[in-house]
Image: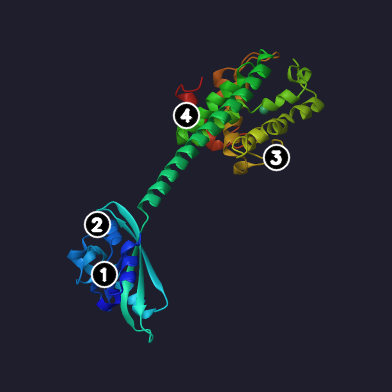
Amino acid sequence: MDNLFSCNLYRLLLEQLPEGVIVTDAQGKILFVNPAAERIRNLKKEDILQHNVLGCHAPASHEKVTRAIEFLRAHPDKTYHRMVNDQLNKKVYENTYTGIYDAEKTMQGMAVITHDVTEKRRAEELQATASRAQNIELENMRLQYHQLLMTSMEALTNVLEARDEYTNGHSKRVADIASKLYEHQYGITDTYLDIQWAAKLHDIGKIGISDLIINKPGKLTSAEYELVKNHSRIGVDILKNLDPGERLTPTILHHHERFDGKGYPLGLAGYAIPMGSRIIAIADTYDAMRSCRPYRKPISFENCIAEIRNNAGKQFDPEWVNVFLDLANTGSID
Ligand SMILES: [Fe+2]
């Protein structure tokens, strides 16, 4: 095998290749090491020449190298690749093991070609880190943009409510109560924020209903009431393009459903009604009862509590009524 490298041209070629080259005989004894292999793998050829190829690998890698040699012995037409993350020398390189066979396909030796990919790998890691930072920045921008849109919609609702002294601040109070109920059970989560926003915007659809009906001092006729009922759907129409993940619009659409299925717009019942809608229904009714109306004074705290309790399982989800009563009875809702 030594004679193979007596030809000066071949030897020069192998010496000057940018890839590391280690050549062994059939038993794995190292016969040749080029300078690139010494540089990439941080070894000296005089330390490993005439030694077994396992000698230039850490003991932990011996099993993998042996497997590569066995693979080549069994598959004369194939090469074996192994990516090495050399922690000690802070290098990453790909070893390609290729057998050297005679005309009868008997393995006469083996070449290990080492391709240094450290710089390429570092560049990829930097790129991945930059890309991740960019994604975080984009996500932050998206959240800020969403917050801005929602705040604008809230301002619109405030303007709507400010035109009527009886409903001024209603949506904000509903949002405060609804978010207190949710927080009491589940803490502050993404859903908490969704319910808070849905509550702030639950009546935004009233923009689409005539002021004459919305601000009518007396009782509504049934025809007028039918028109008012459209506000849930109008609210969804206003917000649907600002709510691509549908985190708010289903809650807004169903905030007038009843637990017994007699509500609107779809007559959903029980747990088919989104949780946020079931919570907002309680907060909405409570605040409406506690507020002054042109045709009546605010209803007392005790009577409001009794009304909510009496409607558990009818208008309201009984489990959320219990949460509401817990908070009301301990001073968190007044
Ligand atoms: Fe409403």
Tell me the number on the disc at residue 32.
Answer: 1
Q: In which quadrant of the rendered view does residue 38 lie? A: bottom left
Residue on which the image places disc 3:
267
Three-letter code for the amino acid on which mark 3 is drawn: Gly
- Give percent across and percent down for residue 216: 76, 17
Return the disc, 1 or 2, that comes first in the chain's sequence.
1
- Give percent across and percent down for residue 157: 65, 21
User: Is the N terminus in the top left, top right, bottom left or bottom right quadrant?
Assistant: bottom left
Return the disc, 4 or 1, that comes first in the chain's sequence.
1
Residue under the image location 36 percent in, 72 percent down = 98
Q: Which one is in front in this view, the residue at disc 4 or the one at disc 3?
A: 3
Residue on which the image places disc 4:
326
Residue under the image location 38 percent in, 85 percent down = 103
- Give percent across and percent down for residue 315: 63, 34
* Vertical order, 193 against 71 (above or below): above
Q: Are marks 3 and 1 in contact (CB under 8 Å)?
A: no
* Vertical order, 286 against 252 (above or below): above
Tell me the number on the disc at residue 42.
Answer: 2
Would you say 291 lies left or right of 232 here? left
Return the disc, 4 or 3, that comes first in the chain's sequence.
3
Q: Is mark 4 on a helix, strand or loop?
A: helix
Which one is nearer the viewer's eye here, 68 or 303? 68
| Mark 1 Cα shell of 10 Å, populated few (<14), some (14-19), many (≥20) | many
